Image (spheres, rainbow, N blue to C red):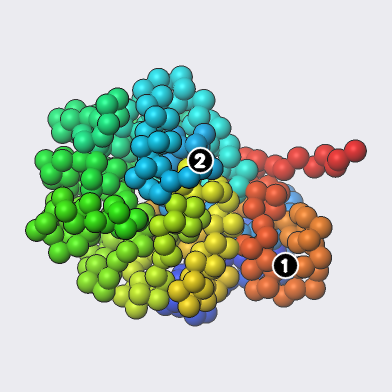
Amino acid sequence: MIHAFRAELLSVPHDPRDAPDAVRHELDGLLVVEDGIVVARGAYGDLAERYAQVPTRSLPGLVVPGFVDGHVHYPQTDKIASHGEQLLDWLDRHIFPAEKAFADKAHADLVAAFFLDELLRNGTTSALVYPTVHEPSVDALFEAAMLRNMRVISGKVLMDLGPEGLNDTVAGGRAATEALIRRWRGRGRLGYAVTPRFALASSDAQLADAGALVAEYPEVLMHTHLAENLRECEAVAERFPASIDYLDAYDRFGLVTPRSVFAHGIHLDDRSCARLHESGAGIAVCPTSNLFLGSGFFDLALNDRHRVTLGLGTDVGAGTSFSMLHTAGLAYQAALMRGERLDPFRALYLATAGSAALLHIGDKVGALEPGMEADFVVLDAKATPLLERRTRSAELAERLFALQILGDDRVVSETYIMGQRAWRRSSSAPA
Ligand SMILES: [Zn+2]
């Protein structure tokens, strides 16, 4: 089936840091989709004649690629906005008790469905997701993602040093990981990530086994946390005295690879960033979480100096919003705290093609180029009276920045998955 959408189109397929002319914008554009794949995209005037016979729908608003959340925890959905702690205490007090409930598949099913619908409402069509230590928590998420045809990457959390009820063993963790990889390989738009929770939650033997799994399965990602919080960094230094730094603790177990995605990376130095670049590993930057847990501000300039691969993540439930637009706005503010200005087009890149590249799905989603899957979002800059007023005569960069600073789920009027509308904002006006 072939159909087309006429709209204002915007995407940033490459990092403006490395490709300053990366922005692709058609004020009056045409996006032609066949069987879920973009077959043509350009100015309406250039394409209209060629596709005159194709049914065409006009979309009011700014069409951008579906957002790609580079790091998020679905079992923490119900613990978003939990008061009062930094990372390690927050985990003990709020998160670990909630995650225990995911041993129950029926509970996991309910939360997974709510979580994925929430992503769609926020315009997020792809994500790299933490489940829990429990094997059924992965099945629940993958089943719900298949139903919605979403591009979701996840993998059972490995944490043999976790608290009672949330710990596995080296052998048990491997067996469940391999069973899940076999069970879900090649299905829908899913991908697998070997997921040690973080350095402190696994024994040396389990970290080494995770490294072995990554080496044995070349199609999987490696997903974990890195250098988020100072107390955590101190505990890692104490636990791994032979390691040069936090990243090196992972490196010694074969966990720093081109397929490695590290969340946060707040407390890194030149050596770590150089090693990240050299290895091809990258960072999912999570500014709302870093602010919420008082972890610190990501050093964009340091990472840019070393040309580290970067994407953007919400990190809910430490993150405070599922909106990648809002997250982009916070990334701007966090960068400014370090004296850096994040350009709104680069912020859009990080939330779309950047995260897609980080997740090794950059050839499939994130840029709305011909040959890619037609996941996209319609943004409505008139969604609130303030936004409408602020953007009334704004040029593109100003409008995009206002959407990032003032926008959230309210500005997402429609979300499309492979050319099919998967979510639409209720148009019912208040009485
Ligand atoms: Zn996280």
The residue drawn where x is 78% and y is 61% is: 386
Residue 333 visible here: yes
Please identify the residue farthest to the front as the structure is shown: 84
Looking at the picture, which amino acid does disc 1 mark? Asp
Judging by the rendered image, the residue that carries numbered circle 1 is 28
Name the foreground residue: 256 vs 421. Answer: 256
Quadrant assignment for the N terminus: top right
Q: Depth check: 428 or 4 in front?
A: 428
Select label 1 or label 2 by which is in front: 2
Q: Which residue does the image show at 40% across and 49% down from the upper left?
A: 86
- Horizontal side, residue 6 vs residue 266: left or right: right
Could you tell me which secondary element the residue under label 2 belongs to? loop
Looking at the image, is 239 positioned above or below residue 173? below
Give the labeled residue for mark 2. 82
Is label 1 in a helix, a strand or a loop? strand
Q: Where does residue 401 sit, x and y in percent of width and height?
A: 64, 68
Q: Amino acid at mark 2?
A: Ser
Residue at image point 58% right, 37% down: 117
Q: Nearer the viewer, residue 424 or 405?
A: 405
Q: Nearer the viewer, residue 90 or 371?
A: 90
The reply to whether discs 1 and 2 touch (Cβ–Cβ < 8 Å) is no
| CA distance for labels 1 and 2 | 44 Å
